Image (cartoon, helix red, strand yellow):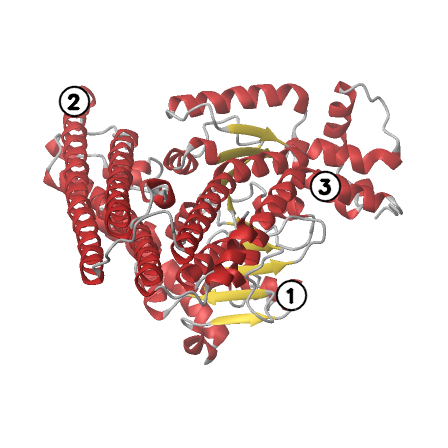
Amino acid sequence: MNDLRGGATLIRGQHRAGFRDLDEFWQRLNGLDAEIRALAPHAPGFVQDTINRTLDRIVAFEPSISVIGQVKAGKSSLLNAMIGETGLLPSDVNPWTSVITGVHINSRNRPPKTRALFRFFDAAEWDRLVETGGRLGEMAQRSGFETEAGEIRKQVMEMRRTTEERLGEEFTGLLGTSHAFPEIEKQVIDRYICYGDPEDDAMAQDGVYADLTKSADLYIDLPGYPKGLCLRDTPGVNDTFMMREQITLNAISESRVCLVVLSAHQALSTMDMALMRIICSVEAREVLIFVNRIDELADPVNELQDIHANIQKTLRNAGVGADVEVLFGSAYWANCALDGSWDGMSPGSRAALDRILAEAGIAAADPADMPQFLLSASGIEELHRAIVKRVIEGPGAAIMRDLETELENITRMIETVTTAASGQPDKPAIEIDTETVRATLAQIRKAAEDQFDAAAVESREALTGRLQKSQDAFIDSAMEALGSHLSAFGEKQGWSYGVTSLRMMMRTAFFSASATLKRDTNDCLGTALASYQSLMCDKLGMQPEDVEMELPPSPRQKPPTALAKTLTLDLQSGGWRRFWRFGRSGRPDKRHETLIRAETDPMVDELLTDYFDPSVAEHREVLAGFLDDQENFVNAVLDYVDTGESEQDGGVTEVRENVA
């Protein structure tokens, strides 16, 4: 390893430079946080819940970036390079035992005395995982592949037997629990997320808990790096048994940036269709593609142009917009620069770097400058900037708008109550009917909730109808295509039929229903706000400008990543093609239609129960919070006007001065 002397500090500074804009964003967010906290001690009780809710949102804000890709694309190495910790995650794990691993940088939500937290499957999850043979086993069973399904179950049961024998009596007690550690240590990480070789004494403890581990969370403090950022390393999408497919899709659904890692050697071929399905299920502006391992290309300067053109063509053919950014680089180069091991690079990797330097007009690099050249060529700085841009323009911009709206409403309510408390001598006194006002409040709430519930039921019924109609149309089309195939080629040639059209129809239907839900919620909020304003002006003598409020923002709709789940029709290799051969009958039969429906039914169910229904609940929670805030506001004004009490006037006046 090279002695970098003062160069190490320089490299770390260069490595952090891509996060500079995120640091500036956090300064603005911290400014809002400080403003709200300064307001809190002086604020009257009726806005304390709103203030606490707003502060909780700031503390909980942690944009998540999911790193996905094929096994051996270098995801873990890339994540290590991104955070500047070259040995944090093992970079060579068995694909079907890898674990969703969240790396939380400078987190404000770290559990007490915990740096590493590992959660285990509960008993029901474990039994389903191993008894069905994972998603692949379920599909084989449903398709009538009894032999293949049995073989898959046999292999998975062997994994279960090995796991339970390795853990012994400890096994049962681990299910549904977690292990926490006060420090991050490599040997600890290896035991939970890296599969070891039980025949090798030196590696016998590696992966001892890996099969049973559902997720891992590592909390790392990095001075000079942004706070509140989470990077999630996921299992490879070409996991042999698709054991953790749903866990990966859930992680992507919760993230605001999806980083797709490709290997430069694989990127020239058609991109993995599992990756394409995921990309198509996420908003294009939230997707980044990083082509890794360019250090292994013989002629990176020219080959990258061909790779880029081919990726763009594949994306266009899949109907993905031009918002997907494609970057190139090498995690290997970045890690060599960061840990000073560049003089031990493989000859091929050094040759690739020399070609890139030659293209830049650098014939012979000074050894002292090699770390800087490596880090620049690695693409890590550019990747940092691209991620930061999406974080700031996506969840960052959203939370800033939300907080500014909340702060404006809070100060408006406080000022209005202050006005009511101080009295308005130039205006005639009005007679307050307290019972009527409070009865009207109850009527406004009930009307708003009834309006929302009715609209939500209507939207769900409409979505169900559209999804089922899309499914029926797809099945009819598939069976017609199958019949045409048999007429043209007979029963001996295998048949395939793309599911892209069904996924696109369902995605369109889902987002249309989501937009309707958002619009209906805003209508409910607007109607309720108008009723509150009318009540306060007519019954409490307020002026219209005193009761102007901004409507709360709608919650984010999670992308429907269930649409990316693998179906039998997606598997067109090996034994799966045999299923779509038809023997002597020479025609499709009921079992094929039944299978297609059985495969696509869960898509309908999951879009409704796992995505739309939770979204309805989130929108209703926003409505309930708004109704609570407005009721507290009206009651506070009513109390001041009705009782004429003034012992809090001084405090409220102080609030007004602080707000100003």
Tell me the kind of residue under disc 3. His
Distance of mark 2 from mark 3, alpha carbons?
58 Å
Residue position for label 1: 187
Tell me the quarter of the picture where residue 590 sits: top left
Residue position for label 2: 484
Distance of mark 1 from mark 2, alpha carbons?
58 Å
Tell me the kind of residue under disc 2. Ser
Q: Residue at x 40, y 46 (%)?
A: 253
Q: Nearer the viewer, residue 226 or 415?
A: 415
SS at badge 1: helix
Q: Position of residue 6 (x, y in %)?
A: 88, 45
Q: Nearer the viewer, residue 270 or 197?
A: 270
* Disc 2 crowd, CA 10 A, few/some/many (<14, 14-19, 20+): few
SS at badge 2: helix
* Disc 1 crowd, CA 10 A, few/some/many (<14, 14-19, 20+): few
Residue position for label 3: 15
